[in-house]
Amino acid sequence: MDKALLTELGKDLYEAAKTKKKKPVISKMYHDFNFRDAYEIQKHMLKSYLDDGYHYSGRKVGMTSEAMRKQFGIDEPDYGYIFRELKYENDSLFSTNDFLEPMVEAEIGFVLKEDLEKGNVTAEDVLAATKYIVAALEIIDARTEHFDTTIADSIADNASFGAYVIGDVILEPHQRDLSLIGMVVEKNDIQITTSSGASVMGNPANAVAWLANKMNELGEPLRTGEFILSGSFISAIPVFNGDTITVKYGGLGEMRARF
């Protein structure tokens, strides 16, 4: 796709995020649209965020479930960027008017104490470079008309990132086996699902290692102080006005987001 068009589409997605008015689905308008184009559009969307005064706080991994990747016909996760101004405390109250199509994902976050810039980063390297882990919720959103979109559409839209919520309890990275961290998820005080860290590429540290290696290939290594959302333990939960999502983590306390 033409560079000028990629720039325009990135600016359009940022405009949609700010005005809360959806844009047409890119893959439906341009049949030659591919993953490379999607990440280029993402870069231009991110530039609009930065030009408007936002600051990176870290990155996110998406599509960490093998079943989801098979469903969408992709062979690796995707990634996006998160912003300091879109970070919220546990039990925050959100207005649904601040989003277009909000959904909640539950995961854990890694706070880095060292750069991850060498080649062939492993899960053990990730744990060694992590200051602490904490429970997190991600609110994902869709800035395009959400009918029959593709993963490339989501990637262009900064991997559907909307906001994130940080928990109150921290653990040292080797304090427990992350694959065994369990969770119980409730919507409006009714249990709807359970999961564990093993659902995220076997261990959430594996997802961060994948991200570190991918970013090293691109010359954008993960840096000290970054907050990394490592991928959801569960399928995204749609939320509407009046909903409360509560997630009870084994060893990491309780998370809540109210709408």
Image (spheres, helix red, strand yellow):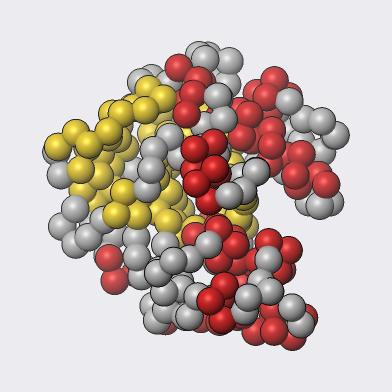
Left or right of 35 on screen, residue 108: left
Horizontal side of residue 28 vs 250, given as left or right: right
Q: Nearer the viewer, residue 28 or 245?
A: 28
Residue positioned 62% across, 72% down in the render: 45
The number of numbered badges drawn on the structure is: 0
Return the x and y of residue 115 as percentages of the image width and height: 76, 37
Residue 61 screen position, x and y as percent: 58, 45
Q: Is residue 50 visible?
A: no
- Residue 148 is left or right of residue 54, and the answer is left
Q: Quadrant of the C terminus?
A: bottom left
Measured as percent of width and height from the top left, residue 221 is found at 78, 45
The image shows residue 162, relative to residue 205, as above or below, that is below
| Residue name at image x 46 percent, y 40 percent | 232
Name the foreground residue: 251 vs 169: 251
Residue 1's quadrant in the figure?
Answer: bottom right
The vertical placement of 249 against 12, above or below, is above
x 69%, y 84%: residue: 5
**Residue 127 seen from this side:** yes
> Going 52% across and 32% down the picture, which residue do you hit?
200
- Residue 227 % position (x, y): 58, 43
Image vertical order of residue 81 relative to residue 137, above or below:
below
Q: Is residue 157 left or right of residue 37?
A: left
- Please tell me which residue lies in front, 108 or 213: 213
